[in-house]
């Protein structure tokens, strides 16, 4: 199976960005607790728009993404993260074309 890549962009109030980053790291660890399904990640802030945070995740495969989506509400940090995210600007998964 091929790796699956995720891009997610969130609007976050400036004063909440440090906590959103902290919660993101906690969630990545919670997701990987039983099995490493996120193989790498980065958390980015947009340079020209204050308050936009981006996740770039590399997943083991597309099935790992689907299985994690089902478990998403059960992770300890998701509720607080979702309360701090003002808007989900973009969310998508990609497979390599080459």
Image: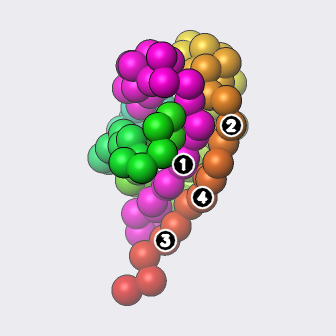
Q: Callout 3 environment at 10 Å: few (<14), some (14 to 19), or many (20+)?
A: few
- Give residue 41's position: percent from left, percent from top: 33, 44
Between circles 3 and 4, the one closer to the viewer is 4
The part of the chain drawn in magenta is 1-28
- Give residue 77's position: percent from left, percent from top: 54, 16
What colour scheme was applied to this rendering of the protein? Answer: rainbow
Q: Quadrant of the N terminus?
A: bottom left
- Give residue 68's position: percent from left, percent from top: 58, 39
Q: In the rendered image, is residue 9 in sight?
A: yes
Between circles 1 and 2, the one closer to the viewer is 2
Q: Answer with mark 3 or mark 2, whichever residue precedes in sequence.
A: 2
Q: Answer yes or no: do the residues labelled 4 and 1 have beta carbons within 8 Å?
A: yes
Query: Can you identify the residue that label 2 sits on?
Result: 87
Between circles 3 and 2, the one closer to the viewer is 2
Query: Can you identify the residue that label 1 sits on?
Result: 8
Distance between the alpha carbons at the discs numbered 1 and 2: 11 Å
Distance between the alpha carbons at the discs numbered 4 and 1: 6 Å
Task: Give the residue drawn at x 43%, y 76%.
Answer: 96
Secondary structure of the residue carrying numbered label 4: strand
Distance between the alpha carbons at the discs numbered 3 and 1: 15 Å
């Amino acid at each position: 199976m091929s790796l699956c890549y995720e891009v997610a962009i969130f609007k976050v109030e400036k004063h909440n960005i440090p906590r959103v980053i902290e919660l993101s790291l906690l969630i990545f660890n919670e997701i990987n607790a039983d099995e490493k399904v996120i193989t790498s990640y980065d958390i980015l802030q947009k340079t020209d728009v204050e308050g936009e945070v981006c996740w770039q995740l590399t997943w083991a495969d597309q099935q790992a993404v689907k299985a994690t989506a089902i478990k998403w509400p059960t992770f300890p940090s998701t509720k607080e993260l979702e309360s701090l995210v003002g808007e989900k600007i973009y969310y998508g998964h990609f497979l390599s074309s080459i």
